Amino acid sequence: MSDEYVSVKIPKELYEKAKKFIEETGTFTSVEEFIKYVLEQVLVEEEKPSYTPEEEEKIKERLRALGYL
């Protein structure tokens, strides 16, 4: 990742909720770190392949044929 940063505006109420979460859990050192983590998780999730119902059924059929289901 780049060391270059940009500013992003979020509602103050959302910022305060994130800040409270961080203070209560102690899992992050700043709101910025928390927001970066959340965005990365969402984007990674979006990169995962998703299958149509038809594709899922074909996969299940293959797994049944191989004896896994």
Image (tube, rainbow, N blue to C red):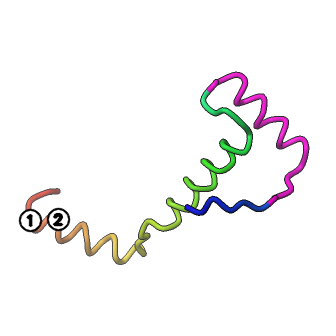
Q: Does the magenta stretch include residue 14?
A: yes
The residue labelled by disc 2 is 63
Q: Position of residue 33 (x, y in %)?
A: 66, 43
In front of the other: 30 or 61: 30
Q: Residue furthest right?
A: 12
Residue placed at 40% from the left, 72% from the top? Answer: 51
Amino acid beneath label 1: Leu
Q: What element carries label 2?
A: helix
Residue placed at 77% from the left, 62% from the top? Answer: 6
In the rendered view of the protein, which quadrant contains the C terminus? bottom left
**Hey, which quadrant is residue 13 in on the image?**
top right
Q: What element carries label 1?
A: loop
Q: Residue furthest top?
A: 24
Q: Position of residue 64 (x, y in %)?
A: 15, 64
The residue labelled by disc 1 is 66
Residue placed at 80% from the left, 35% from the top? Answer: 17
Query: From mark 1 to mark 2, how far is it between C-alphas?
Result: 5 Å
Q: Do the residues labelled 1 and 2 touch (CB within 8 Å)?
A: yes
**Hey, which quadrant is residue 50 in on the image?**
bottom left
In front of the other: 44 or 60: 44
Residue placed at 72% from the left, 24% from the top? Answer: 23
Amino acid beneath label 2: Leu
Q: Which segment is the magenta one?
A: 7-26
